[in-house]
Amino acid sequence: MSATGTLDAMVVGGGPVGACVAALLARAGGHGPAPRVGLLQPAAVGAASDDRVFAFSRASERILDAAGAWAGIRTAAWPYERMRVWYEGVAPEGEDVLQFDAAEVGEPNLGYIIPAQRVTGALLDSFRESGGQAISGELQGMSVAGADGLVRIHSTAGEWAAQLIVGADGARSAVRGACGIEARTASYGQTAIVARLIPAASHQNTAWQRFLPGGTLALLPLADGSVSLVWSLPEAQARALLAATPADFEARLLQDSDAALGRLALAGARSGFALQRLTTDRYCAAHCALVGDAAHVVHPLAGQGVNLGLLDAAALAQLCLQARASGEHLGAQRTLRAYERWRKGENQLMEFAIDAFNSVLAQGAGPVSALARRALVLTNRSALLKRFFIGQALGRPPDLTAWESDRVSPRR
């Protein structure tokens, strides 16, 4: 089979995680000539209809900066300085509310709330400016053949050969299926409702989160004074609320938010998506690596999904470029297995913690749930524990010195 082109790496999936790994590989500062990188994405990716927002950690900020995208994102990034976490039976301003404040650890903020469209657009711009090849099309199949060990990639846009294919194409990953990697999914029995709201009171640059029987309600601060709602509920309740009149929806919202920000008025359409957990036993196969939702999907209550994906992207790019600098094949199995060991362990730890929070605090009852709630109170009263958890929330990115050197420059 003859290829339309030969690349060092082909990334499939043009969302934030796919665009990030593609931009990091294409920039490749400090590791000699940049690899030839393609990004295969459906034409609809980055469409103006994508009105989601993401909560990005400070670690993600550094990764986006290393990918050359932060300058194009900064003006749309709204920093949040505090978090307030409480549960039913505790007043939102009471002393038992768990509070995190960036000032407690000498940081200007805990992270940023950023529109998804702005993030993806800035990453794609950086990728193209660095010499990357953006391709509109969908994966049809792939195979490894010949002594060169290159992956043959079949798509609606043509055919390519590459040392490495990166699956960043989401929970229904075509790359994962083509590699024969199985995924296990489990429903949380919940639907997340998302919407933009206008609060009667100031959001105070604070992310608000309340644990309730059956789910979690989060209000994320936005630059214009509005808030982004992420409200996980049992499926039947969510369906009823999505079909309810705006007045009835807002009345239930006022009740479940405990009026922390006063009346919350809808500022647009409501949408909902079913929540499920996805795990894979492997993150890699021959000349193939999975990143982001293609490898793992977690509950949104901690807002960690996209942050875990960006950490995947940075770790994979770092290891691949180090291997390339040593004269190794970009998709060498030793490199990909090192990536799998690194990220799988860290992701599984986060998945376990998030599921525990969801099971015990959001949906639990009885003595175990009561103990967990007591632990929140004790954490709030311990400066040492709070500093630890704030440090975890800020995140620790992989080594980014390869992109921070003076040699980083777009390829012409």
Image: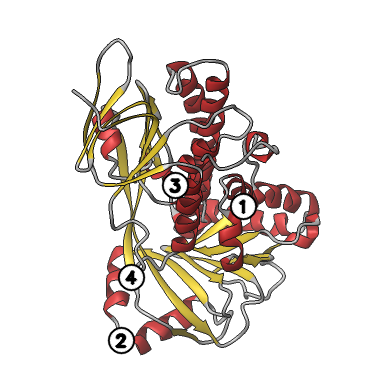
Mark sitting earlier along the chain (1/2): 1
Mark sitting earlier along the chain (3/4): 3
- Please tell me which residue is depicted at 43% across the width and 32% down the height of the picture: 36
Residue beneath disc 2: 245
Circle 4 SS class = strand
* 4 or 2: mark nearer the eye: 4
Which amino acid type corresponds to the residue marked 1 in the rendered image? Glu
Q: Residue 336's x, y, as percent? A: 45, 23
Q: Is residue 26 left or right of residue 400?
A: left
Mark sitting earlier along the chain (2/3): 3
Q: Is residue 86 left or right of residue 274?
A: right
Q: Nearer the viewer, residue 361 or 167?
A: 167
* 2 or 3: mark nearer the eye: 3
- Please tell me which residue is depicted at 19% across the width and 42% down the height of the picture: 156
Residue beneath disc 1: 61
Which amino acid type corresponds to the residue marked 4 in the rendered image? Ser
* 1 or 2: mark nearer the eye: 1
Circle 2 SS class = loop
Binning the other alpha carbons within 10 Å of mark 3 as few (below 14), some (14 to 19) or many (20 upward) gives: many
Q: Quadrant of residue 406?
A: top right
Mark sitting earlier along the chain (1/4): 1
Q: CA distance from mark 2 to mark 3?
A: 38 Å
Q: Residue 383's x, y, as percent? A: 80, 54
Residue beneath disc 4: 271
Circle 3 SS class = helix
* 3 or 4: mark nearer the eye: 3
Mark sitting earlier along the chain (3/1): 3
